[in-house]
Amino acid sequence: MQQKTIIRVAVPEDAGLVLQFIRELAEYEHLLETVFITQEILYEWISSHRVEVLLAEYDGEAVGFALYYFTYSTFRGQSGIYIEDLFVRPQFRGLGIGTRFFYELAKIARLRGCFRLDWMVLDWNINSIAFYKKLGGHPVENWTTFRLDGEPLKLLAEK
């Protein structure tokens, strides 16, 4: 029997599996203590289409996920896709599954009139950086990601 990869759209009932992948990704990134999301929250977000998820199955086994949502560019007047997370279990890397995720995401972007895909990568993740560059991705020059969270966010909201 030939092994094959299937990329499919997650349904709300896949929330438990998606949560498992999120935890595996967080562990890989040394960020497991920052995961607070629950299966119920994921179910709600997937049901409402505020986020969308693709799942990869290799020879019938779930092996990875890509979670994304739509953004908007005021300069272009068009949507984009922001890939929040993309993860393939380590033992299944190198089989073209990550590439298949990007093929599917690019197709979704084109079908929905999006003009770009955006995502972030940790500076130390040189394997992923090399993979993204091989696909044609590039770092965004002259832009720095900023974040406001925790206590500063709370204090600002109270003003």
Image (cartoon, rainbow, N blue to C red):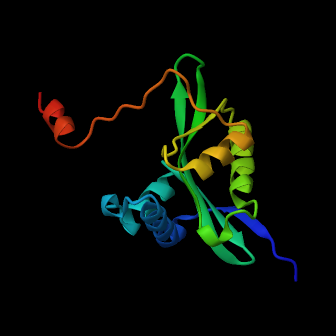
Residue 146 image position (x, y, % from top left) = 36, 31
| Residue 105 rendering spot, x and y as whole percentages | 68, 47
Q: Residue furthest bottom?
A: 1
Work out whether residue 77 or residue 122 is closer to the camera in this orientation and state it.
122
Q: Position of residue 103 (x, y in %)?
A: 75, 48
In the depicted structure, whether residue 59 falls above or below residue 144: below
Q: Residue drawn 68% across and 40% down?
A: 133
Give the answer, above or below, for where 7 lies relative to 63: above
Residue 137 lies in quadrant = top right
Q: Residue sitting at 87 percent across and 78 percent down?
A: 2
Going by the image, does 66 lie left or right of 104?
left
The one of 41 and 82 positioned closer to us in this rendering: 82
Where residue 1 sits, quadrant-wise, is bottom right
Q: Position of residue 23 (x, y in %)?
A: 43, 66
Q: What quarter of the picture does the C terminus occupy? A: top left
Viewer-closest of 115 and 144: 144
Measured along the vertical axis of the image, is residue 8 above or below residue 67? below
